[in-house]
Amino acid sequence: MSIPILSVLGLLPLVGAAVLMAVPRTAAKAVGLAVSLLTLVLAGVVAVQHLSGVELAEQVPWIPTIGAWWALGPVDGLSLSMVALTAVLTPVVLVAAWRDEDRLGGGFASPGGPAAHRWGARGFFALVLALEGFALLAFLTTDVLLFFLLFDAILLPMYFLIGAYGGPRRRRAASRFLIFALGGGLIMLASVIGCYVVSSRAGQPSFLVADLAALDLGGDVGRWLFAGFFIAFAVKAPMVGVHSWLPDAAEESSPAVATLLVGVLDKLGTFGMIRFCLQLFPEASLWATPVVLVLALVSILYGALAAIGSKDLMRLVAFTSISHFGFIVLGIFAWTSQSMTGSIFYMLNHGFSTAALFLVVGFLVKRRGSRSVDDFGGVQKSAPVLAGLLLFAGLSSLALPGLSSFVSEFLVLSGTFSRYPAVAAVATLGIVLAALYILLMYQRTMTGPVTQVVRQRVSRDLDGRERWTLAPLVLLVLLLGVVPAPVLDVIAPTATATLQQAGVADPHAPLAEEAN
Amino acid sequence: MVDMIEPPSLEYLRLLPLLLVFGGACLGVLVEAVLPRRSRWGAQVGLTFLTLVVTAVVTVLGWRAGDVGVSALGSVTVDHPAYFSWTALVVLAALSLLLFTERRLNGGVSAFAPQAAAVPGSVDEELAIRARTEHSEVYPLALFSLFGMMLFVASNDLLILFVALEILSLPLYLMCALARRRRLLSQEAGLKYFLLGALASAFFLYGVAMLFGYAGTFTLAGIDQAVAAGAGSEWLLLAGMAGISVGLLFKVGAVPFHSWTPDVYTGAPTAVTALMAACTKVAAVVALLRVLYVGLGGLRWDWQPLMAAVAVVTMAVGSLLAITQDDVKRMLAYSSVTHAGFMLTAVAGASTGEGARQLSSVGSTLFYLVAYGVASVGAFAVVTLVRDRNGEASRLQDWAGLGRRHPWLAAAFSVFMLSFAGIPLTSGFIAKLGVFESAWSGGYPWVVVVGVVLSLVAAYFYLRVVVTLYFADPQPRSGQGGQAAQAPAGAADATPATGPAADGDGARGGALATEVRTAGAPAAVSSAGEVGVGRASVATYGAVVAAVVVTVVFGLLPGPLLDLALQAGVFLR
């Protein structure tokens, strides 16, 4: 029996979080970063093993009576890419937040107010590690109950990260986040219970995805259960209608937390759609496709328009994410292997590019002490590196060819086009709007005359630590943009398998037919 | 009719746990009569815990030996559910009794009135306070009550059920009225509980009479046979069922028979509240299950919708009213109502499960009772710790920012709140999952959906407490100590006019106690002082720690306890 590497990978950050509380305050940050780097190394080992063809899976009975398993893996392209995303982003945000507690005050806290009760850095690092651990396990698990458990448990560290380390109105934002997420979670709980009932009626209760998928949950029951899961995931992924918690939460969070929120936590939503909605309820998913596609389109356009209209930088980035999540959901529910591969890849890329965007904006906001777009202008003269990186992150967000998001967005749109040309056409508008919100934002904040306040406060360009924080993200965005093929090769089998299971074949590309 | 008088034969060994508790209680009364006042407290504590430990051991041994059967001339059934509930009752009672022993918090005196017979605020009372007298009778009283509960869950006979109901209730009525602080509120609580309890008992007895009229027997098995035979007037049967259900639902604390809960929970000494919340709930729910499943199993199509409706209303009223509370004890009282509703969803489902290793209504309810009971005792233990100069400061507002000053205590309380809210990683989640699964399996998915929605409401008020602990800023307290108790008076279904009087009394009692305690320190007696965490004895801390450990361990690895509960999921008929 070899080492259960998946369990170790998931539990390491959780143990690290506990250990951190016992470590002296002065050493806590270093230990926390070390744990997150070790986790990254482990994730690398997992990736290498998977690529070399080893099937990684662990399965131990957890609550045998109700058929719940501690089941991690088998690892596939979807879980591997999400694990990689989580493992990379965690050390990055820890470094980004390295000095948050000394100089927080800026835009993220009102002096003398509730900020006086800010928690220490040790707590921050511990909470981030706990979040990482829960997220890794959630991305790896193939047991519905265990997933639900983690899906809810992850809210607690995030709640405290927003509520204890955010801006002046953080309590409200944190509560709002929690209420939305718990509400979605409880609706999902009803469906989880339904899964138990259905499987126990079929003989042996089991929460394993493989067992449940074999039950062929169709008909009315399948549709109800699907709805429960989908609503929970739609709240998490934020789709329009249940998105309103995200801008508030992102606005009041510190940039590091906002990065984790949008980059990792929200991915649980789209991850769940593929892993649970599509794999467990293919029939119901097909049945719901028209509605979901419309919702996705609305999300794309609404998010983009709201971003254009947003006067708050953090809110703006949050709205762009709503738009991006619209693309991801579109790709998932377009039912082509191309678009689904694109969506999974998009989840990865969006994590990196939005992280870069949030972090640069965070550095900017901290210097100026304001999040309002109107308070900036001409920053590129005083802080050229910062301005350049903001532009880079922005371009990556608007999917400039050559950068990674372009590949995924192209795959999603072309895949969607082959089945739903009209939908793809409308979605393309989102790209145009994306160019608008990013470039307008850049123009308003970075170019133009330098105001007195900006000159005084944003006089310092990015320092070494801040540059090193962004370097891996920039590198990844470039790398995945230029040579996406290796990653796509890992992801594509998952997409194909999911479609196969649903019994959906790729449509013939209409363009190809014309060419014949 | 009776040809021959049977010589009564009792299965002494099998009934030993019951007899032990009863014997311990009787010995306690003797101790009270014989020993000098000084040594009573210690002797009572020793005797009580000795009784509990021995009872627990004997119960577990009997359970492992599988010594089950209808006993005591058919009036008591010792079966697996009974063994499970006995063990749970003894353990939960021991945890709550740890809180009874707390004297360090109060500056060397117990949380019970020095002389219950003295009029509050009178000279007699003051003399008693100065003489530092104590009522060590609370220990035998608690044991008598525990005996009643253990008999209650094992009764196979409606008359024994009624007797057990009274045995468990009377000591509780008395103990509720024994608080040292805010004595008027406490006495009011005792009286209210007594009057309403008596009314519920009357309903219960009436129901018993009806069922006897229908079946011609008091035993549950006999009633079951009569129902199966279908002879007699159906109206008599239904009326009997209704009467008994009212009596039992009153004890469970289900809506519309819940109205005593908030006042009694708030007024009673917190240690007694813990005992009531944890143990009475176990006893009442298991007895309800036994009567419905064993005696009235043939009527399940009639009572299932009824229980479903009661469950939904209970969850709704409990959780919605809990939101409006700003007193922690009162909030916990409504929370107990809400949880009664969650448990009743499983009762309504009446799912039997295929074989002993699958989820059944009885099994999942038993698990729920343990999870809820342990977290309740823990939560009330924390309530006893948060104090100002007048005693417990249970106003939610006073708890603001406690998490920063006392992170471990706040963390413990948060664990209990999360467990109540059914958040994963705590036993409360598994418990809720279990009862909902049984309800759905039993054909009540709509109850589950309603329950899930109301869980969100419940989660809201539990998490509000967590928010207050960690994120709220402490409010400056207006000097007068009396205000600390006004919260209940302003609450939705307010404590009547005695509120202010009791306040004054509380302040006064506090002032006296302070005077006695600090003897010569500068008197700042008019102020309630800062809210802080009192220094407690190891017993209270022990109860908190044990409750946290149980809550977390059974949240992560519920398998063993769940299996145990499910194996205990079948009543012996």
Image (cartoon, rainbow, N blue to C red):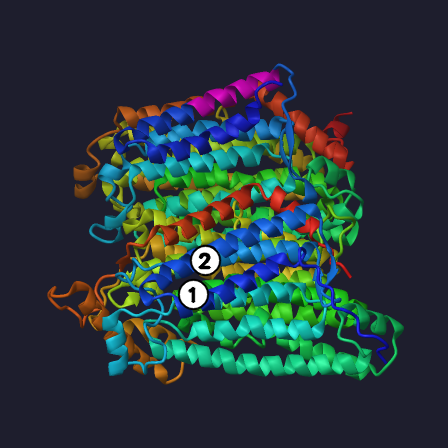
| Tag 1 and tag 2, C-beta contact below 8 Å | yes
Dominant secondary structure (helix, strand or loop) of the stretch shown in magenta: helix
The residue at 48%/54% (across/down) is B50
Is residue B547 in sight in this rendering? Answer: yes
The answer to which of B508 and B538 lies nearer the viewer is: B538
- The earlier-in-sequence mark between 1 and 2 is 1
Task: For mark 1, give the secondary structure.
Answer: helix
Q: Position of residue A387 (x, y in %)?
A: 31, 31
The magenta segment is: A38-51
Residue type for callout 2: Leu
Q: Position of residue A48 (x, y in %)?
A: 56, 16
The answer to which of B435 and B247 lies nearer the viewer is: B247
Task: Report in which chain the residue with disc 1 lies.
Answer: B
Mark 2 surroundings: few (<14), some (14-19) or many (≥20) residues within 10 A? some
Q: Position of residue A295 (x, y in %)?
A: 60, 50
Residue A42 falls within the magenta-colored stretch? yes
Which quadrant, please, contains the C terminus of chain A? top right
Left or right: B268, with B81 as reference point: left
Judge whether B554 appears above or below B124 on screen. above
Q: Which residue is mark 2?
A: B47
Mark sitting on residue B31: 1
Mark 1 surroundings: few (<14), some (14-19) or many (≥20) residues within 10 A? many
Task: For mark 2, give the secondary structure.
Answer: helix
The residue at 53%/69% (across/down) is B318
Residue type for callout 1: Val
Judge whether B573 appears above or below B243 on screen. above
Mark sitting on residue A500: none
Same chain for labels 1 and 2? Say yes or no. Answer: yes
The residue at 37%/63% (across/down) is B40
Residue A58 falls within the magenta-colored stretch? no
